[in-house]
Amino acid sequence: MARASKSISQSYSTAKARYAEMGINTEAAMDALSKIPISLHCWQGDDVGGFENSGESLGGGIAVTGNYPGKARTPDELRADIDMALSLIPGKHRLNLHAFYGEFGSKKVDRNEIRPEHFSGWIDWAKANHIGMDFNPTCFSHPKAADGFTLSHPKKTIRDFWIEHCVASREIAAVIGKALGSPAVTNVWIPDGSKDTPVDRLAPRQRLSNSLDKVFTKKLNPKHQLDSVECKLFGIGSESYVVGSHEFYMGYAIKNQKILCLDAGHFHPTENIADKLSSVLLYVPSVLLHVSRGVRWDSDHVVTLNDALHEIASELVRNQLLSRTHIGLDFFDASINRIAAWTIGTRNTLKALLIALLEPPALREAEKSGDFTSRLALMEDAKSLPWGAVWDAYCESRNVPAGIRWLTEVKRHEASVLGRRG
């Protein structure tokens, strides 16, 4: 450990000098990175199972593949796994919780009956960890969502049920935000759509708009709770038509000044949400990013350090959009160690942000002067700058393993804890 730390220190000293030559303060970049929280998604730890014990299979166009051993079976096991992941990720982060992860004991509590007390264990855990939390209504994996429609359902009784659930979720999020001293973003996503081509595309969207108006009727304190709506291109069972499309939710968010959630896997494979940020943030107060990685379809793969992620981070940093952006993760992989999935995805997201924070200012200067030759040359040369040495130094300065050494901790945890879960 000491030898590795010495090596990291030497590499960082060289990198620091190299960046300084280009007008970049690496210490300032690391300090800025430490202030960016990433909201880890609880559903990676148990394959989007939740703790309702309702017996309902996973639905809503969501599919988790793989059977890697050791998934969390209880709230305590899930919290312990999240603790493990957070210990391997530099910085102070958040947890994104879905409504069906409440602690209901032996009682049957339907979605429209959830209350803050069902999440007191999560609040206590977050307080102990000094982290904030975000929240989501769970509008899938339920008998009243079995036909693929919820807030846009043609039956008023079904719509009212889901309206009540979303209203309850907002109230719970407000209690969470107040208790933790940090506003909880409540993100509304619904699976509503059709497998085949519908005749009437308008009426479901009219119903959805009316339902959302009812969900958001009560004004809540923005110091405690913030509202977000999330679009999608298509899903399993909604290949031909999605009620809550990008155009629908962008219009709704602009009209009602809600946070617009952009999920990296919810668009065409050739679309990059980085290009949308500077457009939508002209008209909405802020955005929620669900950092994911779609492969051919919205398959929510573990985030890798690819071009799409680089571009998202660069767009946020270059245009000073971080203060108006909430960053969360959304992927689930049951084919690999789930704690490793959290760790890889979050560390990659932070790496991309660090690289963006270390970008040479000469890039912008070249563009402003119209010197596009230098802009391209500098942009390409920046890709080989020694950001990895800065990342390793950042990890060690935050008392988490640098490089791949975190994997040793995960393997040890797998052998001593996960392997005993059966």
Image (cartoon, rainbow, N blue to C red):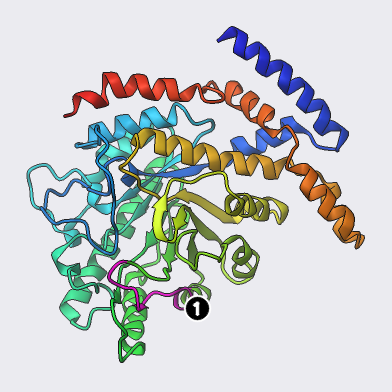
Q: Residue at x 36, y 52 (%)?
A: 135
**244 in magenta:** yes
Q: State the image quarter where residue 366 is shown.
A: bottom right
Q: Residue at x 52, y 52 (%)?
A: 326
Residue 392 left/right relative to 67: right
On the image, the x and y values in percent for residue 124 come to: 31, 35
User: Which residue is label 1 attached to?
Assistant: 251
- Which span is picked out in magenta? 236-249
On the image, the x and y values in percent for residue 76 come to: 24, 32
Q: Residue furthest bottom?
A: 199
Name the quarter where the C terminus is drawn: top left
Q: Residue at x 24, y 41 (%)?
A: 67
Is residue 85 visible in the rendered image? The answer is yes
Q: How many marks?
A: 1
Q: Residue furthest front?
A: 296
Q: Residue at x 29, y 64 (%)?
A: 61
**175 relative to 140, above or below:** above
**202 relative to 166, above or below:** below
Q: Amino acid at mark 1?
A: Gly
**245 in magenta:** yes
Residue 112 left/right relative to 407: left
On the image, the x and y values in percent for residue 7 come to: 67, 14
Q: Residue furthest top?
A: 2
Residue 215 left/right relative to 290: left
Residue closer to the observer: 271 or 323:
271
On the image, the x and y values in percent for residue 162 come to: 23, 69
Q: State the image quarter where residue 155 is shown.
A: bottom left
Is residue 128 visible in the rendered image? The answer is no
Residue closer to the observer: 59 or 40:
59
